[in-house]
Image: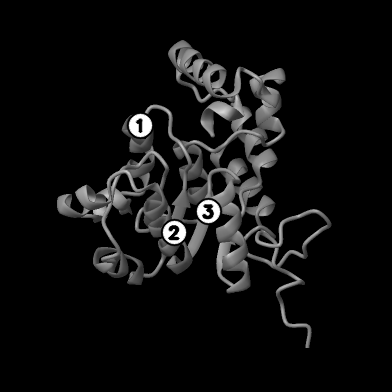
């Protein structure tokens, strides 16, 4: 996701070279976004949100350091067979946000800022025992299933970028009438590019820009996936 976006995530020359090399190896360098500058990509909302940006979004929407986050990431390793003990205990605590971040270039160093802001942040790795992690290591589908399970039982769901997991969870949570924050990517991209904006201005713009992006029902348009937009097809017409 990070490499395919062709965005600059602030990691300097080493990051750019590493992501470019990955694009060349996987897609032969043929990535549509490569034709745009980083500013153009961000202003158009084409860049996945970084952990820091997710933290700023949540803070602007009023979530403080008492909020419990569950971080789902394809880069976070390992868990166990379906012994959901620790996860069930965790998600029973209310005010839990399921935060889906696909790939984090730079690993833990990039996550640390979000962790400092939301110290009650957990992941599969932190909730599972060492024995559980050994049992499920390398089982990608099972790991994804755990993330999906927690996502469906969290108070709020937010994703750093659209994707298959995001689309399925958004549609399922919409069907169940659960709160889901859909980041206004173009707005956030423009706000993050503005180096002179104050926190009060940023917060006001974020709140106003997300008033209708927190789980409200959206009718499916032609060619849109029924799994992401289940209404009106999957809703009672009576």
Quarter location, residue 75: top left
CA separation in Å, label 2 and label 3:
7 Å
Residues at circles 2 and 1 in contact by the CB criterion of under 8 Å? no
Q: Sequence order check: which comes first, mark 2 or mark 3?
A: 2
Q: Sequence order check: which comes first, mark 3 or mark 1?
A: 1
Q: Is residue 79 left or right of residue 62?
A: left
Q: Nearer the viewer, residue 206 or 18?
A: 18
| Image quadrant in which the N terminus is located | top right
190 to 231, vertically: above or below: above
Mark 2: few/some/many CA within 10 Å (<14, 14-19, 20+): many
Residue at 69% from the left image edge and 67% from the top image edge:
230
Residue holding disc 2: 97
Q: Position of residue 233 (x, y in %)?
A: 76, 72
Q: Is residue 218 left or right of residue 151?
A: right
Q: Position of residue 76 (x, y in %)?
A: 35, 42
Task: Decide if residue 196 is in sight here.
Answer: no
Q: Which mark is residue 158?
A: 3
Residue holding disc 1: 107
| Label 3: which secondary element | strand
Q: Position of residue 133 (x, y in %)?
A: 23, 49
Residues at circles 2 and 3 in contact by the CB criterion of under 8 Å? yes
Mark 3: few/some/many CA within 10 Å (<14, 14-19, 20+): many
Q: Nearer the viewer, residue 139 or 97?
A: 139
| Label 1: which secondary element | loop
Q: Sequence order check: which comes first, mark 2 or mark 1?
A: 2
Task: Decide if residue 107 is in sight here.
Answer: yes
| Label 2: which secondary element | strand
Q: Position of residue 160 (x, y in %)?
A: 53, 44
């Amino acid at each position: 996701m990070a490499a395919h976006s062709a965005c600059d995530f602030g990691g300097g020359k080493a990051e750019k070279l590493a992501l470019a090399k990955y694009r060349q190896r996987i897609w032969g360098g043929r990535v549509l976004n490569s034709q745009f500058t980083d500013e153009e990509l961000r202003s158009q909302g084409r860049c996945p949100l970084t952990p820091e940006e997710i933290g700023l979004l949540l803070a602007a929407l009023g979530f403080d350091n008492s909020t419990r986050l569950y971080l789902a990431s394809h880069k976070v390793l390992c868990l166990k067979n379906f012994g959901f003990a620790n996860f069930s205990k965790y998600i029973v605590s209310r005010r839990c946000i399921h935060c889906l971040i696909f790939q984090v270039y730079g690993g833990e160093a990039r996550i640390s800022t979000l962790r400092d802001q939301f110290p009650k942040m957990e992941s599969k790795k932190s909730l599972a025992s060492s024995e559980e992690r050994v049992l499920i290591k390398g089982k990608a589908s099972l790991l994804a299933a755990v993330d999906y399970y927690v996502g469906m039982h969290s108070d709020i769901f937010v994703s750093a970028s659209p994707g298959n997991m995001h689309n399925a969870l958004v549609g399922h949570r919409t069907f169940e009438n659960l709160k889901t924050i859909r980041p206004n990517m173009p707005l956030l991209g423009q706000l993050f590019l503005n180096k002179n904006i104050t926190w009060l201005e940023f917060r006001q713009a974020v709140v106003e820009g997300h008033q209708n992006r927190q789980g409200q029902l959206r009718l499916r348009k032609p060619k849109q996936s029924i799994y992401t937009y289940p209404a009106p097809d999957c809703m009672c017409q009576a």
